[in-house]
Structures are given as structure tokens and as C-alpha cells.
Image (cartoon, rainbow, N blue to C red):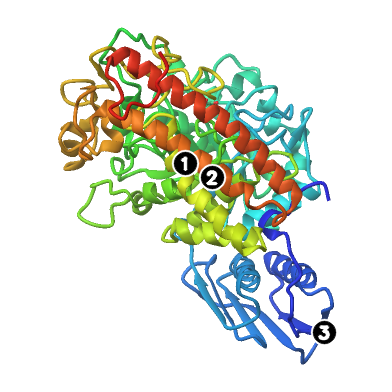
Amino acid sequence: MEFSQLWLGIKPLKGCSIKTISIVCKEHVEQACAAVWELRNELSELLPEVSFVRGSADLSIKLSIAPLTEPESYTVTSNGTSASVTGGSGVGILYGVFALLRGIRLYGFGEFEECGSPTSPLRMLDHWDNIDGSIERGYSGRSFFFKDGELLINERTVTYARLLASVGINACAINNVNVRFGAEMLITEKYYTKLTSLIELFGRYGIKLYICVDFSAPISVGGIATADPLDPAVQSWWSEHCAKLFSHVKGLGGFLVKADSEGRPGPYAYGRDHADGANLLAKAIAPYGGKVIWRAFVYNCSQDWRDEKTDRACSAYETFKPLDGRFEPNVILQVKNGPMDFQVREPVHPLFGAMPKTNLMAELQLTQEYTGQQKHVCCLIPMFRSFLDSRTCCDAENDSVGDVICGISAVSNTGDDFCWTGSELAAANLYGFGRLAFDRFLTAEKIIAEWCALTFEDELARRVTAEILLGSHKAYEAYTVPLGLGWMCKPNHHYGPDPWGYEFDRWGTYNRADRNAVGVDRSHSGTGYAALYNPPLAEVYDSVNSCPDELLLFFHRVPYDHRLHSGKTVIQHIYDAHFEGYEQAEHFAELWKTLEGRIDERTFRNGCERFTEQLRCAREWRDIVNTFFHRLSGIDDEKGRTIYP
Ligand code: GCV
């Protein structure tokens, strides 16, 4: 096998007396057939001696469809000799079968009961794969969807679809939102056959295929002079082109679009707004049930660092809030979790809770662009869970992010390396994202414990990895950029420390540190960003006294001796966090070493190599950031530790 099966990698169950199994399924929908295949495949690997029979057997499994709350819902009951899986549809059966198999792998063949119903209708992975095979911000090898301009469909694609379905992901955009290297041609005849095959394969696993399109396709593909969304020639071009595309490529979910952002074309070039742009495509694909997922990541990337009023954090809000109510019903606005760009800590994006008349979905980042690039262990599930739980204060109750969105997506962290995610431990993020997207009330602890138990047989390995994963985001934040400061990483590739790397540049990403103070004033006396939140959040963030410590320097510029709610001064917090974060990373590396001989050699070595690099880099972060602030502030560490001159 050239690639790992991740959490679907089956180990034989020891000491099980089941010798015969019967599977009865009268539902002939394709996902139910996939479910039967999963059962036979996985059970014969779990129980190598077992035979599948008709009629009476040691274990009888019945699969059926019945009206449940949602088509994707399921109920599973099992008592060791008989099991029943009921789904609201074929997809519900498939999800139920994966739940049953998960239950068997976790607890054996005893009593088991589970009901599942998605808390979010759209659960999606976005690939930033280019059609030449490279991956933007990819840290796990090359693309397994594309090579040299060709779309690949092979054994890996099948396994990927199984992995996604096993955790409830039901949509996937396979190419980069930066539509480059000829990817604008994905909507042309050349790709119809391959896209159709992929849709069929994904469809068996309940996954809708999406593609990213170039807003200027009327020019780049159609050869006409403009892409103006209000130009009748452009409208006809999209309508005709999409009629052809959707009639050949049946079942395509729709388009994901990045427009007017970081150099991509968009409606602004023609003096139009983002509703004009999104609606153009939405109208063209509505007849085929298609959706347009339009990204809200729009900001001015040519800012002047001398200008203290322009604030990148305000940009998406200012662009989209006035458009609330203007989007077609099949448009979904995809909003990053925070207002900047997937930093280790950001406040929740103020657009959540600000656009009640627009379909909103959240965009998260699994690929660890700013969180250690899969060289550092950084489990994002606790952060994702608390993001979904965050109140937006748009209503008196049921106003958390999870309540106001209709979908949740994440930029995938996969590639073609053996373990899919570069770091074997980063697979926990992929697993956890799917589980949480399906059921946002699952705790991070439960999800991580599950992943550890499905990945490692050894009890100590399960405990050790759970401890590492659950503490890893906190540690990473501590030794990189605490208190809500971001962007102290090296420019462009975003790995390793460079406190002033982005300070005087055009991307609008500053820390404003000088000898007196640090942080960005986003209160009413600064950029005014805090006021974009609904009350009382706006007041909480606006005041230095009520702003939570963890976001203080995102919202405020304070002197180094400012006292946090924790009782520490800002400068002492910076020193302590960096020393403690590094020690925590050392502790994780030591813990990992105890697993030698208890887990497979490849995984063990993969972890050792990465911890060696994590420690080297964490030490760099600690010493550079501490020295930077020591030099600026002139304030010594009250604990007298070495801070470099
Ligand atoms: C796909 C950040 C990343 C870019 C990415 C962009 C986006 O700026 O660095 O690589 O582009 O976000 O989300 O569009």
C-alpha cells in the first residue's frame, strides 16, 4: 500500500467469537451499496476468519431507510448478535454504517447505540491544489487530484472519499481559489469526462463536487473583451457556458470563488459590487441546482503602514455588510473564522451575526500555514470548537457562530505523501474537523480521544498523543505570538519568527511595537474596528479593562507595564509565555519518545523528526521574540532568565 488508511486502517480484533455475519439491505441506492461494501470490507479485515452468509448468523446486520429528521441522519443499535442501521436516506445509512464500524473498533461487539444528525447542512473541504500538481500552502506533498494539468482518479481518490464520508464531510472543492496555471479551463470540454467520473465516485459517498472558477473566465476562456457582471454579453456567456457545463457534468455542486482579493479579478474592476458579481454566477447555475460559494476574504493589500486608520480587519465587514439581503438564494458567503487570516488567535469575524439576510458559512484552515506547517504539532480542534460556540450577540439566544451559519468549510491539509497530512499527528485535525462539522456539540476531548483510539492500539500511545494534541495549540500560541498579536512570522512563506517582517509592508499586518507600547489600537480612538461587533461585545472589546487578555494586543495598544487580568504585566506575560511554551514543546517531545517500540516505526520516526524541528524552531521563536521585546522595552525578566542581548 502506497498510502495510509488513517483512521480506517483496520487491525484485527482479538478474542472475538463471531464467525458468520449476515448483512441485509433492501435499499438499492448507491450510497447504501457503498455502505454494504464498507461493512464487508472492514469487517473482514477486523475479523479475518469471518464468512458472510445469508440467513442466520452469529451477527446479523440490517440496513434500511426510514423517515428521520434529516436525510443524512441515522440511528444505530447493536447488541452483539444483531445490529440495525437506519438512515434518512442512502447517505444516512452510509453514515450510520461508519458510526457502527467506529463503535466496533472502539468498543468491540457489545451493546452500542448512536443517533446522529448533522448540525450543519454543508460540511466542506477546500483544496488549494493547482492543476500542475503543486499545492498552495501545502505541507504534505503534492496534489493527489491533479498532475501536469490532468485530473487524477485512482485508488487514492476512492480512499479519500471513504475517509471524508466516514467523518461526515459532504462537499469538496478540488482546486485552488487562486485559479492559476490554466485551471480556468476546468469548466471546459477538456475536463467534462473526468469531472463526471469524479462526481460519480464522490456521489457514492454522499460528497458534492465543487470547482473554483475564474471570475474573468468570459475573457480568459470565452475570449470576449470584458467580465463586467452587468454586461448582457457577459451574462449570456455565463448562462450558455454553464448550461453546457451542467448538462455534461451532471451533479456538479457549484462554484467557489475568490474575487477582488490578493490580485484576483472581480467585479470592482467594472465599478460593480460583490452582490453583482456573485449573483451573475448564481443566476447562471440556479437552473441546475448549483450553489455559488463566494469568499468574503477581500481587503486592500496595498496599504501604507504610516496610515493608522486603514485597518485590514475592517475590510470584509465594510465590503459585505451593506450587501446583506442582496444575494441570490443560492449564494453562500464564505467567511474566514477571524478578520485577518487564520492567525493562531483572532477574534471571531464580525460578519457572523451581522448579515441575517445572507447565507453564511465559516472557513477554517487545516493546512497549518500560520500554525507550524505540519512540522509543529498544533491540534486545532479545541480552537474550532470554541469558535463555533462563540456568541455573536445578534440575538438574545441561539446566536453562536454555529447557530448562524449554514455551512462550515476548511482548507484541506492533505497531499500525496504516505500519511496524507505530512505529520501523522496532523491527521487528527482532518478527522476532528469532519466530526465537529457534523456535530458541533462534540467536545474536543471526545474527538481527540476517538482519533487516538482509532489510530493507536497501545493504551499509553493513546493517552500520550491525546495529552500532546490537547495542549498543543496553547503551547504553539505561547511560544509564537501571545495576547492576540499576529504576523510576527517570516514574510511570504510564514514559517519561523520575524517580529518586524510585516511591520512596514503593504499587507496591513502590523504589531506597532516601539519602546513605549505594543499592539494595534482598534478601539474607538483607533481604527474603530471594535465597534463592528454587536453590543455588548463591542463595548467589551473597546475597553482595555474588559477586553480578554488573550486578545488584548489585537484590540489595544498598551505600555509594556500594563497589567493584565491575570495580574502579570504585558512584558512579563510575553517572557513567561515564551519560556513556558517552549518547555511545553520539550515536554511533548519527551512524551513522544516514550512511545518507541509501542507504535509503528514509521509513525514514531515521523514524530521524532518533526519534534526535533519543532524544538529548534520554538527555541528560535522564544529567543527572538523575547529579545525583540527586551530590547525595545528595556525591561528585564523579573525571573532573571537569559534573554539574549
Ligand atoms: C489561497 C492567505 C494565504 C494565501 C491564500 C489566501 C486566501 O493570504 O497566504 O495563500 O490564497 O490566504 O485565503 O485566499
Residue 609 visible in the shown view: yes
* Cα distance in 3D space between marks 2 and 3: 48 Å
**Which residue shows up at 70% across the image and 48% down it?**
603
Pick the residue in front: 104 or 161: 104
**Which residue shows up at 75% across the image and 47% down it?**
602
Pick the residue in front: 474 or 371: 474
Q: Quadrant of the C terminus?
A: top left
* Cα distance in 3D space between marks 1 and 2: 6 Å
Q: Which secondary structure lies at badge 3?
A: loop
Count of numbered labels shown in the rendering: 3
Q: Which secondary structure lies at badge 1?
A: helix
Residue indicated by mark 3: 53
Mark number, residue 59: none
Residue 313: x and y, percent?
33, 26
Residue 181: x and y, percent?
69, 22
Considering only order in the chain, which callout, 3 or 1, is on the residue closer to the N terminus? 3
Q: Residue furthest bottom?
A: 56
Residue indicated by mark 1: 584
Query: Would you say 522 lies left or right of 617 here?
Result: left
Q: Residues within 10 Å of mark 1 (few under 14, many from 20)?
A: many
